Image (spheres, rainbow, N blue to C red):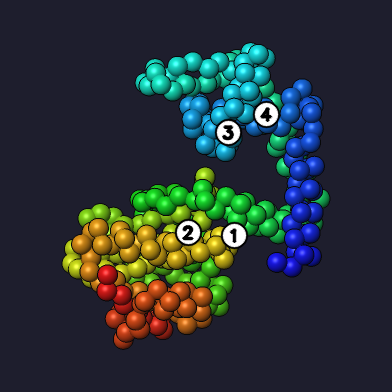
């Protein structure tokens, strides 16, 4: 690895550590370090089960126990046995803890706004932050079935159309591109899969079925912040697995040769080019894969 690049990464880490207050004994002048404040924040966000809290914050058991005891000593939280499972514990904010959570939220919003104000192109700064966030948390990305009419699916579809409009230098109309009945993208005919990090949509792919053994891959999209991390391949593998589980034996898809990254991925994953199988106006390449 290039040493100059290593130094750039380390410089970035030092800057972030200072900016987020990792070195402060009193984070945001509230009398406790960042670690304690972060635990309080996570509990306020709903991570009340101690084991889930530990997994969310990626803390070892000993450190989390010490941080919880410190917050209990301040009467900011209470930890009690889980009434649904006596082997586990849950922790909740006290009234004082809720007040402190609200104060931290307000101060954190102010700090975030101040950071954005330093750059004359805040959108560029946010996009760079998203790339870093997704890269660091790539192992936390989840894949889940989604309703094609849900808010997160609609967001992905709008982003998909905007992305294709830009790449193909035209106005991409979803209705002209193999519009599907909702039932074709949900079991038992098909499925629609979302990749997300927390509440951040990162990608999607649909399997459009008709009850037979042949189905189509539709609406494959990856958010710019998640590109270069192998997410497209993981989504395609997920779609193929879902299709097999639905009894589908052959998948087809269409794409445009201008989308060279996608074309390369499909060929690398064993998709074979075939003749045109519909009259949609946008694609010029057609592929098939037997599962």
Few, some or many residues within 10 Å of mark 4 (<14, 14–19, 20+): many
Q: CA distance from mark 1 to mark 2?
A: 10 Å
- The label shown at residue 37 is 4
Query: Which residue corresponds to the image point at 65% horizontal and 13% vertical from the top-left?
Result: 73
Query: Which residue corresponds to the image point at 68% horizontal and 31% vertical from the top-left?
Result: 35
First in residue order: circle 1 vs circle 4: 4
For the C terminus, the image quarter is bottom left
Where is residue 159 drawn, in percent x and y? 51, 61
Mark whose residue sits in front, 4 or 3: 3
Mark whose residue sits in front, 2 or 3: 3
Q: CA distance from mark 2 to mark 3?
A: 31 Å
First in residue order: circle 4 vs circle 3: 4
Q: Circle 3 sits on which residue?
A: 60
Q: Circle 1 sits on which residue?
A: 225
- The label shown at residue 1 is none
Placement of 205 over or under 83, stated as above or below: below
Q: CA distance from mark 1 to mark 4?
A: 28 Å
> Is label 1 in a helix, a strand or a loop?
helix
């Amino acid at each position: 690895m290039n040493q100059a690049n290593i130094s750039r990464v380390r410089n970035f880490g030092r800057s972030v550590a200072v900016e987020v207050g990792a070195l402060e004994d009193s984070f945001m002048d509230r009398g406790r370090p960042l670690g304690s404040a972060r635990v309080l924040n996570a509990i306020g966000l709903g991570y009340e089960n101690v084991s889930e809290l530990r997994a969310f914050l990626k803390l070892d058991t000993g450190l989390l126990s010490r941080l919880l005891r410190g917050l209990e000593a301040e009467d900011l939280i209470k930890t009690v046995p889980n009434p649904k499972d006596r082997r586990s514990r849950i922790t909740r904010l006290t009234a004082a803890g809720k007040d402190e959570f609200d104060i931290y939220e307000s101060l954190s919003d102010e700090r975030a706004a101040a950071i954005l104000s330093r750059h004359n192109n805040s959108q560029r700064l946010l996009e760079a932050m998203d790339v870093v966030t997704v890269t660091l948390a790539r192992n936390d990305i989840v894949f889940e079935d989604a309703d094609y009419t849900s808010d997160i699916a609609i967001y992905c579809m709008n982003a998909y159309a905007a992305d294709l409009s830009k790449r193909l230098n035209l106005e991409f109309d979803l209705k002209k591109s193999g519009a599907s009945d909702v039932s074709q993208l949900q079991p038992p005919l098909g499925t629609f899969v979302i990749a997300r990090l927390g509440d951040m949509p990162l990608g999607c792919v649909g399997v459009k079925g008709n009850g037979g053994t042949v189905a189509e891959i539709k609406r494959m999209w990856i958010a710019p912040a998640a590109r270069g991390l192998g997410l497209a391949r993981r989504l395609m593998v997920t779609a193929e697995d879902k299709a097999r589980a639905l009894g589908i034996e052959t998948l087809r898809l269409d794409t445009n040769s201008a989308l060279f990254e996608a074309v390369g991925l499909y060929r690398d994953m064993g998709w074979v080019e075939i003749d045109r199988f519909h009259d949609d106006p946008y694609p010029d390449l057609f592929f098939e894969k037997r599962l």
